[in-house]
Image: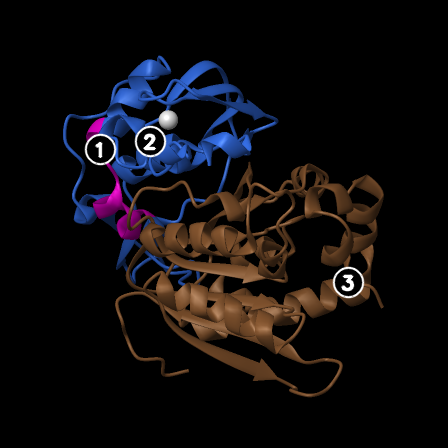
Chain colours: A brown, B blue
């Protein structure tokens, strides 16, 4: 199977047809939502928080963040700000009238919020895109470093971020997690169902050098 | 885009990172809409110490909305006690003290979470770059030379 990020940059790949396919596939929706719950369990939120959703797409994770604790969202309902590079994906989120704020932005260009803005950040199936540089002017390393430096600064001390992503290989896994460590994060990689075709990789990040306990 | 978000958003241009005037962004030709949302007092109490109150007041004035009080309310001012009998009590005699959102909380909720910029621009006070807002979504994609 060819990986979408090997072919086109996400803003071109997720055109209207692809965005629609992605959002209406119930299999993808189910996987996305279970990964969101998994990420939430790793964030340890206990009260309504301000959360950044990196690569929010059509708002599948955001809808879960907006749910209350009694609907199964730990600490919820949360208020979230999502950004995505695909305007078609955001268009679907607008149609669904998701509750979070949406921005058209490229995580590889940084995270334009003042220091200490967010209680937490979440990213589902997005940051592998950062490893692809689209023009000769930019490198994957530069995109990763702008993203993690910006993310680190935008989080409160003691905050956590969980990024589920699909690394192409071990080298890419190392490249991503070491970029996070260079930005100042405490970082751990967690793998569910390792070695199977359902393997899922979560990068668990902490701000302020706190130890990982989950 | 909610006014809450604008109280945290800065200019994304590389050379603006160290400039104090790259925050807050200034709205231009904005079209506002009230998008109703359920009040979340716990969230308001959480976010209150992180708000830049003076800048929020400035934004509200730039948008021509009613002015905010000069200083931020205390988190304790966001709830008030109300004496009432629980719904399950048909006698109406078992009066309890309930914590409900105060008017201060409802006003803050209206400003931060229900007042949305649907279209217009957001302008950096340092470099003058304008970020367009369409259908409530701000476009923060930058040309490569500004990153
Ligand atoms: Zn600027």
Which residues, given as a range, are shown in magenta?
Answer: B44-54
Residue B50 in the image: x percent, y percent? 25, 45
Decide: few, some or many residues near mark 1? Use Cα within 10 Å; few <14, some 14-19, many ≥20: some
**Which residue corresponds to mark 1?**
B53
Q: Are marks 1 and 3 on the same chain?
A: no
| N-terminal label among 2 and 1 | 2
Q: Quadrant of residue A127?
A: bottom right
Q: Secondary structure at mark 3?
A: loop
**Which residue corresponds to mark 3?**
A3
Q: Tell me: is circle 2 under 8 Å from ligand 1.
A: yes
| Chain ID, mark 2 | B
Left or right side of B85 for A193 = right
Q: Are marks 3 and 2 on the same chain?
A: no
Q: Is residue A177 magenta?
A: no
**Which residue corresponds to mark 2?**
B16
Q: Residue at horizontal 60%, vertical 58%?
A: A131
């Amino acid at each position: 199977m060819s990986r979408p990020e090997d072919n086109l940059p996400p803003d071109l790949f997720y055109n209207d047809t692809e965005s629609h396919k992605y959002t209406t596939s119930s299999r993808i929706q189910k996987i996305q939502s279970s990964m969101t719950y998994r990420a939430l369990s790793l964030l340890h939120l206990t009260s309504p928080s301000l959360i950044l959703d990196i690569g929010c797409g059509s708002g599948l994770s955001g809808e879960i963040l907006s749910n209350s604790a009694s609907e199964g969202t730990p600490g919820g309902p949360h208020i979230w700000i999502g950004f995505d590079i695909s305007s078609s994906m955001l268009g679907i989120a607008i149609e669904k009238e998701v509750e979070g704020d949406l921005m058209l932005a490229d995580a590889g260009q940084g995270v334009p919020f003042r220091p200490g803005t967010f209680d937490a950040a979440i990213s589902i199936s997005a940051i592998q895109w950062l490893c692809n540089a689209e023009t000769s002017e930019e490198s994957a390393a530069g995109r990763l470093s702008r993203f993690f430096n910006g993310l680190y600064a935008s989080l409160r001390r003691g905050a956590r971020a969980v990024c589920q992503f699909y690394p192409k290989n071990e080298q890419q896994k190392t490249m991503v997690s070491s970029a996070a460590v260079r930005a100042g994060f405490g970082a751990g990689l967690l793998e569910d169902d390792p070695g199977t075709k359902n393997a899922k990789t979560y990068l668990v990040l902490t701000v302020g050098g706190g130890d990982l306990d989950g | 885009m909610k006014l809450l978000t604008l109280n945290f958003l800065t200019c994304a241009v590389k050379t603006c990172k160290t400039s104090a005037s790259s925050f807050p962004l200034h709205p231009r030709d904005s079209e506002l809409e009230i998008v109703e949302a359920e009040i979340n007092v716990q969230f308001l109490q959480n976010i209150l110490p992180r708000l830049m109150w003076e800048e929020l007041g400035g934004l509200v004035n730039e948008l021509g909305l009613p002015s905010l009080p000069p200083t931020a309310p205390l988190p304790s001012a966001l709830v008030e006690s109300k004496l009432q009998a629980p719904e399950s009590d048909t006698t109406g005699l078992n009066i309890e003290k309930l914590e409900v959102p105060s008017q201060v909380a409802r006003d803050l909720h209206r400003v931060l979470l229900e007042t949305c910029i649907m279209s217009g621009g957001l302008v950096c006070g340092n470099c003058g770059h304008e970020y367009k807002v369409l259908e409530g979504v701000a476009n923060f994609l930058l040309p490569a030379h500004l990153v």
